[in-house]
Image (cartoon, grey):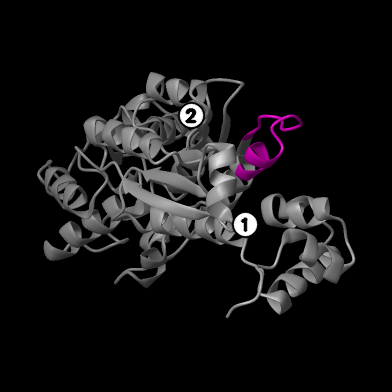
């Protein structure tokens, strides 16, 4: 016959702490000193204490799960972001429901409905629409929301993003300094804030160099995929040589890898004939047939920071202060853009 169940008071007595401290270790471990937390966790393990998580969930009204909604699960950028989220939430004893909106507003809305039905504590999301009223409704119903890879338009909503205008400026400045005066920007759809900001940053670099706006020609794409990049390469190569771009800046690395495929299949040399810069610096960028120059984002830190903000608000709603965290990108120059053109 099994003995009586171990109680939270038994754990507190064994660890030499108060019942409240044990409760904090279980529910708000970040506020407990590491040595105390280790002592309590050791007592839990030695006594075989099993927290009544179901009861805690019912008291709170929400489970120990979070939702993560990303634009494109096939993009390694979001895989790395998800890794950062999972590392942080896993350490806090939380589980993550991973959802792929695939850039489709209907899928995004359906996933948000599902996550609310699952009574998640919060949602981390890279929204398709800048002003998604559905997210405001979620907050009004008690679901915490943090925007991920997107600046918040509201002061009462946390967000974690990268200064994409600066990233676009860094990429374009590099190409201009290497002598390029006919440059293509490949990216879309333009409704995505990240794409718009990277293009705006590129235009800012052109203005700072006292060059005409016509230096940059935009090639819109239906998505940010390798296939869309290949199609854009065909359109660029379809231009007369006298007006064809000598450099291409892509809104992300998947597009850049597609452009690289399209160019090399037509025996166009990169960077000798056309230089190429991507964005995100995913692992495939350095491993490409021609190592790809790219604007690096702190992908895992984005996920870690967003998850931390959400957990802080969940655990300490009375003292939590909403933040809009913005990281700075950096340009990583590799072989794909190192060729310097002479003569302007």
For the residues bearing labels 2 and 1, Cβ distance under 8 angstroms: no
Placement of 330 over or under 108, stated as above or below: below
Res 115 quadrant in image = top left
- Residue 231 placement (x, y as % from top left): 13, 47
Depth check: give the residue in front, 172 or 321: 321
Q: In this view, does 140 lie above or below 146?
A: above
Indicate the position of residue 129 as horizontal and vertical percent values.
35, 26
- Judging by the rendered image, the residue that carries numbered circle 1 is 92
Residue at the right extreme of this rendering: 16
Give the x, y percent position of residue 228. 18, 47
Residue at the disc numbered 2: 204
Dot 1 alpha-carbon crowd within 10 angstroms: few under 14, some 14 to 19, many 20 or more: some
Question: In this picture, is 239 found above or below 35?
Answer: above
Local SS, label 2: helix
Q: Residue furthest front?
A: 1
Asked whether residue 67 is in view, the answer is yes
Q: How crowded is mark 2: few (under 14 residues within 10 Å), some or many (20 or more)?
A: many
Tell whether 332 sits left or right of 325.
Answer: left
Q: Which x, y percent locates residue 30?
A: 74, 53
Task: Please tell me the numbered disc located at residue 79.
Answer: none
At a point 78% along the width and 66% down the height, the residue shown is: 11
Whether the magenta-drawn stretch holds residue 313 is answered as yes
Q: What stretch is highlighted in magenta?
A: 311-324
Above or below — where is 260 with respect to 213? below
Residue sitting at x 84%, y 59%:
33
Out of 224 and 204, give the one closest to the viewer: 224
Residue 169 appears anywhere in the view: no
Instruction: Indicate which disc, 2 or 1, sits on the residue closer to the N terminus.
Output: 1
Relative to residue 340, is residue 50 drawn left or right?
A: right
Q: Quadrant of residue 12?
A: bottom right
Q: Does the magenta stretch include residue 43?
A: no
């Amino acid at each position: 016959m099994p003995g009586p169940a171990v109680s939270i008071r038994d754990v507190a007595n064994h660890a030499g702490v108060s019942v409240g401290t044990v409760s904090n270790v279980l529910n708000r471990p970040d506020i407990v000193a590491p040595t105390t937390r280790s002592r309590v966790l050791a007592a839990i393990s030695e006594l075989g204490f099993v927290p009544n998580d179901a009861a805690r969930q019912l008291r709170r009204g929400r489970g120990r799960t979070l939702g993560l909604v990303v634009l494109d699960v096939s993009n390694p950028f979001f895989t790395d972001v998800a890794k950062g989220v999972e590392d942080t939430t896993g350490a806090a004893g939380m589980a993550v429901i991973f959802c792929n909106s695939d850039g489709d507003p209907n899928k995004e809305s359906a996933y948000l409905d599902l996550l609310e039905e699952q009574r998640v504590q919060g949602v981390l999301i890279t929204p398709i629409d800048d002003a998604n009223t559905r997210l405001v409704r979620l907050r009004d119903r008690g679901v915490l929301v943090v925007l991920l890879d997107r600046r918040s338009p509201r002061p009462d909503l946390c967000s974690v993003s990268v200064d994409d205008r600066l990233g676009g400026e860094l990429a374009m400045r590099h190409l201009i300094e290497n002598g390029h005066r006919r440059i293509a920007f490949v990216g879309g759809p333009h409704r995505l804030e990240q794409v718009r900001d990277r293009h705006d940053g590129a235009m800012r670099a052109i203005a700072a160099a006292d060059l005409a706006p016509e230096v940059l020609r935009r090639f819109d794409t239906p998505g940010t995929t390798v296939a869309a990049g290949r199609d854009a390469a065909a359109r660029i190569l379809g231009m007369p040589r006298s007006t064809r771009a000598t450099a291409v800046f892509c809104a992300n690395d998947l597009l850049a890898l597609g452009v690289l495929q399209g160019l090399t299949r037509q025996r166009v040399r990169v960077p000798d004939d056309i230089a190429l810069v991507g964005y995100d610096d995913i692992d495939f960028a350095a491993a490409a047939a021609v190592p790809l120059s790219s604007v690096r984002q702190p992908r895992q830190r984005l996920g870690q920071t967003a998850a931390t903000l959400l957990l802080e608000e969940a655990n300490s709603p009375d003292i939590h202060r909403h933040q809009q965290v913005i990281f700075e990108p950096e340009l990583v120059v590799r072989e794909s853009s190192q060729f310097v053109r002479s003569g302007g």
